[in-house]
C-alpha cells in the first residue's frame, strides 16, 4: 500500500508555483535569526515530511527494483544491480491486470467527474449557505469512516442474497439474483463510491469561487444558464476539475483494498499484485519493479491527460475568440 | 406620495422609455422599495442618488432582471419586462466591480454579448473594434483583464455593455473603486459617450458630485422612497423636503420657533437671532410629508446654504433680523472658497463659504458679523427623518 499510494503526494499542483517568498519583515535586521525565522525556515516541517515520507521511500523503491531475490528466505539483495526485474515483472497476468486497472481508474475518474459536477454545481450555486454545511457533512462523514468498513458495506449491498438484489427481483428488474459481486463491475462501483468526495470537494470550491457576480454579468450579456455554465463557470472551475481528477485518478490507480474486498479473482487490480510480491511472495525486487512501472505509467497518463486538456483549451479558445482583422488580437 | 412627485415631472407620453409602475420590493420582513413610480425618458441620463441602503441598487437590479419585484410593472418601450429573465432583456449593466471574465482576453470579453446574440463574426470584429476606439482602448484587445488598471478595466466594462447597443444602459456605482482624478476623467468620458450615443443611461450613485456633474435628471432616494426628481439645479436650489436639502450640498439647519406671521412674512426666533422669511411654506422633513403653511408657535428647522452667508469683521451693532454675531472657530482654505466654522451664541455652529478671490481670510477667534438675504432661508419640518439630514449641516 505504501509504495503504491505514494504518487498522490506528487500531484502536479493546478496553481502555478509560488513566487519566491517575499522578504520577511525580520530580514531587515539581517543575521542568522532573521533567516532562521523566515518563510523557508517555517516550511522546514513540510520539507522534512516530504523528504522522509516521499523522497526516501520512493528512492528505496527505485533502488530495490534493480536488486534481486537471492534465495527463498531473503526478500531482497542489492549486491548486484540490473534491469532484469522489469521484464520479469511484465508477466501476462501483470500486463492484463495492469490494463484492467487503468481501465477502472480512467472510467472511475470520468464517472466521478460526471457525478460530482452537477452535484458540486448544485451545492455551490443552488443550496443556501446555511444548508451547505449540512450537505458537505453528508458528503464527508462517510468519507471519514474507515475505508475498509465502508467497502465491506458494499459487499453486503451487492451480494446475490442482499437486500438490493431482493428488491430488484421483487420489482421485476432482475430475473435471477444480482450477480455482480466479485466482478470488475463491483470494483468499478466501489471505487466510484470511495473516491467521489475527493472529486466533489475541489469542484465545489472552484465553482463556489467562480462567483455569482460573474454569472450575473454573463446573464446580463445575454447568455442563458447553459451557455453561462459552458463559457464562464466551467472554464473558471477548470483548476478544480484538474485537481479533482488527479486526486481521484492517482490514488485509485494504486488502490487494492476495494479490489480485494469486492473484486475477487476476476476483478483484481495491479495494486494487489504488487502487495502480493511484497507480502506473500517476499520478492521485493519484482514488487518494486512493478511499483515503478505503475508510478511511471500513472505519470504518463496524467501527462497525456494534461496535454489533451491544453489542446482542447487551445482549440476552444481558437474557435471562440474574435479575430480582429488588424492583427491586434 | 411618490405619485404626486412624479406627476409634476412626467412629460408627455411617447417620451417615456422606461416606466416603473408601482414597483415594490420586500426582502423577508424588510421593505427595500416602497411602491415606486418613475418614468425615464428616451436618451436621458438619469441618476438614482441616495445613501447606501436607500434602495437604488435594488431598483437597478430589478430593471436588469436580477431581482423580481414583489409587486408592480416595469415597462420598456411600453412592454412589461418583469417576466423576462436577465438574458432576454435588451438592457446591459456596467457593474461596480467591473466583472470582466478573467479567462478571456479583452476582445473576447467585449464580443461575449454579441456572440450570444449570434451576430455574424465579421460584424462582431467590426463592432468590437469600433467600441474599443470609442473608449480609446484599441491597443488592449489581446490583453487579459488582470493586465489592466482599474480605470482601464472600467472602460472595457463600459465597452462590453455598450457594444450590444442596449436600449437602456444601467450603471451600478461604476466609479466607486476609482481614485478621485480618474473618477473625474471618467465622468467627462461617460458624459461624452452619452451625448454621442444617445442611449438611455440609468446611473446609480451615492456621490452627489457625480450625479450633479453628469445627469439630466436626478432621482433622490431615501428609505425606498423617491424624495425628489429634478435637474441638478432644481434639486440643489429648491429642495422639496428636509432630507433632500440636507443630502445635496452643505446646509446649515438651525432649530427655530415661529414667533409671528404678518403680511406674508414669517418671523422665526432661534436661540441667538431672528430670521425674517418672505415665504410661509413649511416643507416636510421627508417626502412622506407634504408642504404646509407656517403657523405661529410651531417648532421648525430653518436652513441656509453656507455660500449664501456673508461674513464680515464685526463692526457696528448689527441689524436685528437675518444677521448674527459670532466667533470664527476654524477656517479652511479650499482653493476656490474659504470655509469658516463660526460659533454663534453658546451652541449654534454655522458653516459659511465665501469666495477666496478678493477676500482677506479672517483668523480664528475673530469676531464676525454674519448676514444673509431673506430669500436664502427655507423652512423645514422637524419630525420624522430629520436625524439623518441633521448630520449634514451645522446646528
Image (tube, coloured by chain):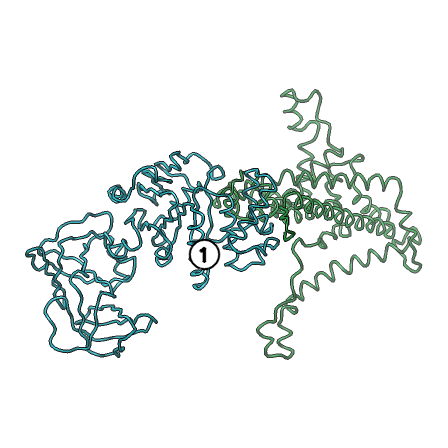
Chain colours: A green, B cyan
> In screen coordinates, is A299 left or right of A313?
right
Residue at 25% x, 66% y: name it: B307
Residue A232 vs residue A262, the one in the foreground: A232
Q: At numbered mark 1, what does the secondary structure look like: helix, strand or loop?
A: helix
Residue tagged 1: B189
Q: Is residue A176 above or below residue B111?
A: above
Residue B202 vs residue B1, the one in the foreground: B202
Residue at 73% x, 43% y: name it: A257
Q: Quadrant of residue B67?
A: top left
- Quarter that holds the C terminus of chain B: bottom left
Q: What is the chain identity of the residue bearing mark 1? A: B
Residue A69 rendering spot, x and y as whole percentages: 91, 53
Q: Is residue A65 above or below residue B12?
A: below
Mark 1: give few (<14), some (14-19) or many (20+) Cα within 10 Å: some
Residue B203 vs residue B336, the one in the foreground: B336
Residue A305 rendering spot, x and y as whole percentages: 73, 46
Q: Residue furthest left?
A: B262
Residue B203 rendering spot, x and y as whole percentages: 40, 50
| Total marks placed | 1
- Quarter that holds the N terminus of chain B: top left
Residue B71 rendering spot, x and y as whole percentages: 35, 36
Residue at 66% x, 68% y: name it: A40
> In screen coordinates, is A253 left or right of A122?
right
> In screen coordinates, is B262 left or right of A72?
left
Q: Is residue B78 above or below residue A36?
A: above
Q: Quadrant of residue B371?
A: bottom left
Residue A205 vs residue B49, the one in the foreground: B49
Q: Quadrant of residue B180?
A: bottom left
Amino acid at each position: 500500500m505504501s509504495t503504491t499510494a505514494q504518487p498522490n503526494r506528487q500531484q502536479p499542483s493546478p496553481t502555478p508555483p509560488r513566487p519566491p517568498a517575499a522578504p520577511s519583515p525580520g530580514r531587515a535586521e539581517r543575521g542568522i535569526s532573521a533567516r532562521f525565522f523566515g518563510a523557508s525556515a517555517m516550511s522546514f516541517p513540510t520539507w522534512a515530511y516530504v523528504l522522509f515520507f516521499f523522497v526516501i521511500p520512493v528512492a528505496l523503491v527505485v533502488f530495490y527494483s534493480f536488486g534481486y531475490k537471492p534465495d527463498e528466505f531473503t526478500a531482497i539483495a542489492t549486491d548486484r544491480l540490473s534491469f532484469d526485474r522489469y521484464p520479469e515483472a511484465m508477466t501476462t497476468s501483470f500486463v492484463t491486470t495492469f490494463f484492467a486497472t487503468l481501465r477502472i481508474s480512467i472510467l472511475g475518474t470520468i464517472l466521478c467527474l460526471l457525478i460530482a459536477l452537477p452535484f458540486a454545481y448544485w451545492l455551490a450555486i443552488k443550496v443556501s449557505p446555511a444548508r451547505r454545511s449540512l450537505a458537505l457533512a453528508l458528503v464527508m462523514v462517510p468519507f471519514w469512516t474507515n475505508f475498509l468498513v465502508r467497502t465491506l458495506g458494499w459487499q453486503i449491498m451487492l451480494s446475490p442474497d442482499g437486500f438490493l438484489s431482493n428488491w430488484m427481483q421483487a420489482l421485476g428488474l432482475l430475473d435471477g439474483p444480482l450477480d455482480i459481486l466479485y466482478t470488475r463491475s463491483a470494483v468499478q462501483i466501489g471505487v466510484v463510491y470511495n473516491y467521489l468526495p475527493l472529486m466533489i470537494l475541489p469542484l465545489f470550491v472552484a465553482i463556489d469561487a467562480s462567483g455569482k457576480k460573474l454569472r450575473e454579468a454573463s446573464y446580463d450579456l445575454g447568455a442563458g444558464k447553459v451557455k453561462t455554465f459552458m463559457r464562464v463557470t466551467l472554464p473558471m472551475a477548470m483548476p478544480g476539475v484538474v485537481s479533482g481528477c488527479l486526486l481521484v485518478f492517482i490514488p485509485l490507480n494504486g488502490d487494492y483494498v476495494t479490489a480485494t474486498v469486492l473484486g475477487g479473482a476476476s476483478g483484481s487490480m495491479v495494486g494487489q499484485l504488487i502487495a502480493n510480491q511484497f507480502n506473500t511472495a517476499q520478492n521485493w525486487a519484482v514488487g518494486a519493479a512493478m511499483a515503478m512501472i505503475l508510478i511511471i505509467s500513472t505519470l504518463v497518463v496524467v501527462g497525456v491527460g494534461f496535454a489533451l486538456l491544453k489542446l482542447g483549451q487551445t482549440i476552444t479558445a481558437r474557435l471562440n475568440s474574435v479575430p480582429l482583422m488588424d492583427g491586434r488580437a | 406620495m411618490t405619485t404626486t412627485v412624479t406627476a409634476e415631472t412626467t412629460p408627455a407620453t411617447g417620451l417615456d422609455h422606461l416606466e416603473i409602475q408601482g414597483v415594490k420590493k420586500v426582502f423577508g420582513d424588510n421593505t427595500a422599495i416602497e411602491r415606486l413610480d418613475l418614468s425615464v425618458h428616451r436618451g436621458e441620463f438619469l441618476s438614482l442618488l441616495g445613501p447606501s441602503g436607500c434602495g437604488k441598487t435594488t431598483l437597478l437590479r430589478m430593471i436588469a432582471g436580477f431581482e423580481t419585484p414583489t409587486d408592480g410593472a416595469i415597462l420598456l418601450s411600453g412592454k412589461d419586462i418583469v417576466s423576462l429573465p436577465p438574458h432576454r432583456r435588451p438592457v446591459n449593466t456596467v457593474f461596480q466591480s467591473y466583472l470582466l471574465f478573467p479567462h478571456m482576453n479583452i476582445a473576447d470579453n467585449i464580443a461575449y454579448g454579441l456572440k450570444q446574440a449570434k451576430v455574424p463574426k465579421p460584424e462582431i470584429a467590426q463592432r468590437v473594434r469600433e467600441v474599443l476606439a470609442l473608449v480609446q482602448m484599441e491597443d488592449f484587445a489581446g490583453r487579459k483583464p488582470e493586465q489592466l488598471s482599474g480605470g482601464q478595466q472600467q472602460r472595457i466594462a463600459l465597452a462590453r455593455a455598450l457594444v450590444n447597443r442596449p436600449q437602456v444602459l444601467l450603471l451600478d456605482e461604476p466609479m466607486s473603486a476609482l481614485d478621485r482624478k480618474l473618477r473625474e476623467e471618467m465622468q467627462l468620458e461617460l458624459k461624452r459617450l452619452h451625448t454621442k450615443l444617445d442611449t438611455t443611461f440609468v446611473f446609480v450613485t451615492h456621490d452627489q458630485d457625480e450625479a450633479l456633474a453628469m445627469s439630466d435628471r436626478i432621482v433622490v432616494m431615501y428609505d425606498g422612497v423617491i424624495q425628489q426628481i429634478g435637474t441638478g439645479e432644481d434639486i440643489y436650489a429648491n429642495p422639496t423636503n428636509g432630507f433632500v436639502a440636507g443630502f445635496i450640498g452643505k446646509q446649515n439647519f438651525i432649530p427655530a420657533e415661529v414667533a409671528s406671521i404678518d403680511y406674508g412674512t414669517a418671523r422665526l426666533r432661534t436661540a441667538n437671532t431672528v430670521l425674517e422669511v418672505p415665504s410661509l411654506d413649511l416643507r416636510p422633513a421627508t417626502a412622506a410629508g407634504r408642504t404646509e403653511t407656517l403657523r405661529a408657535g410651531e417648532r421648525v428647522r430653518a436652513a441656509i446654504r453656507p455660500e449664501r452667508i456673508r461674513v464680515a469683521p464685526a463692526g457696528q451693532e448689527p441689524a436685528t433680523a437675518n444677521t448674527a454675531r459670532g466667533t470664527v472657530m476654524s477656517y479652511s482654505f479650499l482653493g476656490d472658497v474659504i470655509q469658516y466654522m463660526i460659533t454663534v451664541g453658546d451652541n449654534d455652529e454655522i458653516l459659511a463659504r465665501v469666495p477666496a478671490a478678493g477676500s482677506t481670510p479672517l483668523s480664528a477667534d475673530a469676531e464676525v458679523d454674519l448676514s444673509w438675504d431673506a430669500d436664502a432661508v427655507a423652512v423645514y419640518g422637524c419630525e420624522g427623518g430629520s436625524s439623518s439630514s441633521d448630520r449634514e449641516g451645522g446646528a
